[in-house]
Image (cartoon, grey):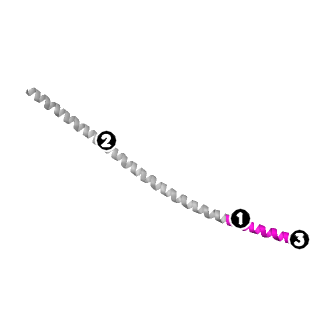
Amino acid sequence: MKKYLLFISLVSFLLMGSCSRVTIVHREQWESVLQKIDTLNYSILTLDSTLHEFNESSKSARIEQEFATLRIEEKIEQISRDISESQARISEISQKTG
């Protein structure tokens, strides 16, 4: 009976040691996962900041392009009016001299 109790005690001790070893391994794995999550969160924040800066610069470039396009359209309209006036004057001169 004493041998049986000793055997059970030994098995229990080994199982507990094994369990705590597994617990330590799981804790180490969990800490590794948490560290990777922190690293990913930092990467996401960095990418988000970069994306925000890119969007802001793109917005500024788009606004500048729209203003440049409007100025070009205004110049084209002015040139078109000048051409129409010049053609009208040429027609008047042609009628007077013709």
SS state under label 1: helix
Q: Name the residue at 40% across, 48% down.
A: 40
Q: Is residue 4 left or right of residue 24?
A: left
> Horizontal and vertical percent for residue 84?
78, 68
Query: For the residues marked 2 and 1, what is the alpha-carbon distance in whole angstroms?
Result: 69 Å
Q: Name the residue at 45% across, 52% down.
A: 47
Q: Which residue is mark 3?
A: 95
Closer to the eye: label 2 or 1: 1
Q: Which residue is mark 2?
A: 29
Q: Earlier in the sequence, mark 2 or mark 1?
A: 2
> Horizontal and vertical percent for residue 41?
39, 50
Compared with 1, 83 (above or below) is below
The label shown at residue 76 is 1
Give residue 78's quadrant in the image.
Answer: bottom right
Question: Quick one: label 2, few (<14), some, or many (20+) residues within 10 Å?
Answer: few
Query: Marks 3 and 2: CB-CB under 8 Å?
Result: no
Query: For the residues marked 3 and 1, what is the alpha-carbon distance in whole angstroms?
Result: 28 Å
* 93 is within the stretch colored magenta: yes
Compared with 43, 79 (above or below) is below
Q: Earlier in the sequence, mark 3 or mark 2?
A: 2
Closer to the eye: label 3 or 2: 3
> Horizontal and vertical percent for residue 90?
84, 69
Query: For the residues marked 3 and 2, what is the alpha-carbon distance in whole angstroms?
Result: 96 Å
Which three-letter amino acid code belongs to the residue tagged 3? Gln
* 8 is within the stretch colored magenta: no
Q: Which residues are magenta?
A: 73-98
Q: Residue furthest bottom?
A: 96
Which three-letter amino acid code belongs to the residue tagged 2? Gln
Q: Is residue 22 left or right of residue 63?
A: left
